[in-house]
Amino acid sequence: MFCSSSPIVGSLVLAPCYSGRSSMLGRSSFPFSLLYRLLSYTRQALTESVPESFRGELLYRTLLANCAGRSNIMATERIFNKMKDLNFPLTSFTCNQLLLLYKNLNKQKMADVLLLMEKENVKPCIFTYRLLLDTKGHFNDIAGMEQVLETMKVEGIEPDIQIQELLAKHYTKAGLNEKAETVLKEIEGENLKENRWLCATLIRLYANLGKANEVERIWKVCESSPGVDDCLAAVEAWGKLKKIEEAESIFDRASKKWKLNSKKYSVLLMIYANNNMLKKGKDLIKRMADSGINIGPFSWNALVKLYIEAGEVEKADSILQKAIQRYNMRPMFSTYMTILWQYSRRGDVHNSEKIFHAMRSSGYTSRISQFEALIQAYRNAKVPAYGIRERMKSDNIFPNKSVANRLVEVEAFKKKALSDLLD
């Protein structure tokens, strides 16, 4: 089918793949506003609150997607099993939620989902293939990625722009620039002026390849009347190519034409962070505040990186804690991980544990990457990590090879600690 002998492991926007059922509840008056209000409830509270006549497949599908989107493994698996108990049909949409979840949290389980799909004769849709292609590319398994692509074509599904973009990114990451450029030529087609909506994608992808001339060529196609995404793509591209003045010029043009939000400002802020330009970053934040722009998670993420690149880890941590308290803001997972890894590399166990628990308080489900960073902190501090295996087990996290090796190293510190007591 579409499974290969090598493990298939590797977020994309949820794209429902319907199984042909036009109405999961057999009626058109489903109260969606009620559903969205109930999404944060426990499953038991929800099923007790929703009228019996509305407890159909659509309700459970939406709950499944919501829990998977929040990276809540236990809740997602409970809802999936409940759907099986209720004899709802297994669809590509349902399986995609599990694939998306495991892609982020436990890639080894993706193979189990694929085997289930094969056993139940559930055909993968284009979103399924996007997940598999991205996973293969993530692990630099280019041969496996191309095998999945060929299988997809045999099944009669042609690659869309999102898949072509994925292919180009992974070819570039693998150093296969010629293959990446071939994909970019396919995306561009014969007449880019008639398909100007492709400009932003092409600008970003050529920047990944380091092709400044191609970035400039594509930018000139839309420069006379660019859209906001074209401008931000160009800002991002010139920043990546270390042409900061060009990036700033285009950003200023965009900010005068449109009212940009915090997420869009974070594009320029991240450029300053990547180039260790702390003063310019602080000035941009002040400009945002003076303009009354709400500083959201993307901007805080860039600001944290800005201070960390400047070597001010404690300052980055302090700013983030103040932002959480003052604005009741939930930081991005990657923001926490950036700080956690900095403390981990220092062997700062106290602050590593503090960030680890802050992530849990923010509602993030435990992942192997968090434990990996935490164990590394103990390893670098050369102190034993008492109870770390039990903590992982209670969170249903199982060590991969790399983490298992580090666990052995930190457990050796227990013996040293005991021998020191006996000396």
Image: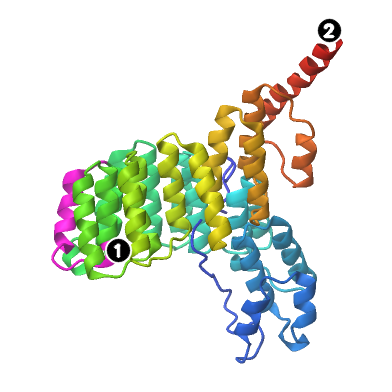
The residue at 45%/40% (across/down) is 143
- Quick check: can you spot residue 1? yes
Where is residue 22 shown, x and y percent of the image?
Answer: 58, 84
The residue at 40%/36% (across/down) is 310
Calculate the distance from the C-alpha at mark 2 to the C-alpha at mark 1.
67 Å
Name the side, left or right, on which 298 lies relative to 94: left
Look at mark 2 in the image and give the residue it sits on.
423
The residue at 80%/12% (across/down) is 420
Taking 258 as reference, is 33 above or below it? below
The quadrant of the image that shows the C terminus is top right
Task: Name the mark nearer the viewer: 2 or 1.
Answer: 2
- Quick check: can you spot residue 331? no
The quadrant of the image that shows the N terminus is bottom right
Q: Quadrant of residue 99?
A: bottom right
The residue at 63%/30% (across/down) is 377
Taking 308 as reference, is 12 above or below it? below
Instruction: Determine the main secondary structure of the stretch shown in magenta.
Output: helix
Where is residue 335 shown, x and y percent of the image?
Answer: 51, 48
Name the side, left or right, on which 210 lies relative to 36: left
In the foreground, 291 or 167: 291
In the foreground, 185 or 328: 328
Helix, strand, or loop for circle 2?
Answer: loop
Taking 52 as reference, is 100 above or below it? above
Residue 423 magenta-highlighted: no
Look at mark 1 in the image and give the residue it sits on.
229
Q: Determine crowd level at label 1: few under 14, some 14-19, many 20+ residues with C-alpha closer than 10 A.
A: some
Taking 298 as reference, is 276 above or below it? above
- Amino acid type indicated by mark 1: Asp
Where is residue 67 shown, x and y percent of the image?
Answer: 65, 64
The mark that comes first in sequence, 2 or 1, is 1
- Magenta-highlighted residues: 210-230
In the foreground, 56 or 238: 238
